[in-house]
């Protein structure tokens, strides 16, 4: 996985770039939640569930389908007052779906561990993209505070933070010009 910090940073950048101005505060908390929650599947290891298992790390909980479930859950529980099928309602659904799905997609760009079951439960294949420039993050905290952890952050800065920042700046500039015009 890219680190929790990087998944979170991407979530905030995506929210900043694509959300309407007047989203409620919990929108931001839910953005963080959706982007990092797939990694809760690491608890599988402590239950003796193997890495390659359906419910193992990077399995079903890293799939696009789980993103859809999560999106539907968030919209129906936390945005109950938003009119169903309204433009805003669709925005929330698609945004949270993509955010949760982005987690597995980023992981598929990492250079270690098993692949990601992006199409689970329909296809259990563990996928990686052909290009994998992001260093896989160590799982334990002690390993994280190491050279490996630092190198990971460095590769994430380059491949996720910088592009995210560019998207935010471009979208803000467009927004600003739109208002001015
Ligand atoms: Zn992950």
Image (tube, helix red, strand yellow):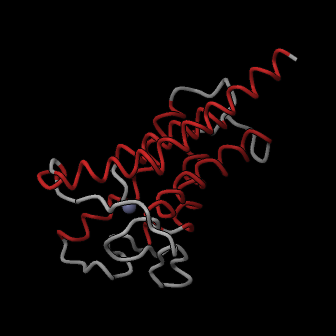
Q: Is residue 32 positioned above or below 20 on the image?
A: below
Outermost residue toward the left in this view: 142
Q: Is residue 148 left or right of residue 58?
A: left
Q: Return the residue nearer the eye: 1 or 43.
A: 1
Q: Is residue 178 left or right of residue 55?
A: right
Q: Is residue 58 positioned above or below 160 on the image?
A: below
Q: Position of residue 109 (x, y in %)?
A: 46, 65
Q: Position of residue 116 (x, y in %)?
A: 44, 73
x 19%, y 72%: residue: 47
Outermost residue toward the top in this view: 180
x 55%, y 51%: residue: 99
Q: Position of residue 148 (x, y in %)?
A: 21, 56
> What is the tally of numbered marks visible in this picture?
0
| Quadrant into which the N terminus falls | bottom left
x 15%, y 50%: residue: 146
Q: Position of residue 49 (x, y in %)?
A: 24, 78
Q: Is residue 45 left or right of residue 154?
A: left
Q: Is residue 41 left or right of residue 180?
A: left
Q: Return the residue nearer the eye: 69 or 97.
A: 97
The image quarter in which residue 111 lies? bottom left
| Quadrant into which the C terminus falls | top right
Q: Return the residue nearer the eye: 15 or 171.
A: 171
x 24%, y 48%: residue: 150
Q: Is residue 161 positioned above or below 61 on the image?
A: above
Q: Which quadrant of the frame does ligand 1 lie within? A: bottom left
């Amino acid at each position: 996985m890219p680190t929790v910090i990087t998944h979170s940073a991407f979530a905030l950048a995506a929210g900043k770039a694509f959300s309407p101005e007047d989203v409620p505060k919990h929108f931001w908390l839910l953005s963080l939640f959706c982007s990092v929650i797939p990694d809760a599947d690491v608890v599988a290891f402590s239950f003796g569930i193997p890495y390659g298992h359906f419910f193992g790390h990077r399995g079903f909980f890293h799939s696009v389908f789980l993103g859809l479930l999560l999106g539907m859950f968030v919209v129906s529980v936390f945005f109950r007052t938003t009119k169903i099928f309204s433009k805003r309602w669709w925005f929330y659904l698609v945004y949270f779906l993509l955010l949760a799905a982005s987690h597995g997609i980023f992981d598929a760009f990492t250079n270690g561990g098993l692949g990601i079951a992006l199409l689970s439960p329909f296809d259990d294949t563990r996928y990686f993209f052909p290009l994998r420039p992001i260093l896989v993050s160590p799982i334990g905290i002690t390993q994280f505070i190491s050279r490996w952890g630092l190198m990971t952050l460095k590769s994430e800065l380059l491949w996720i933070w910088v592009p995210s920042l560019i998207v935010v700046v471009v979208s803000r500039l467009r927004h600003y010009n739109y208002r001015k015009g």
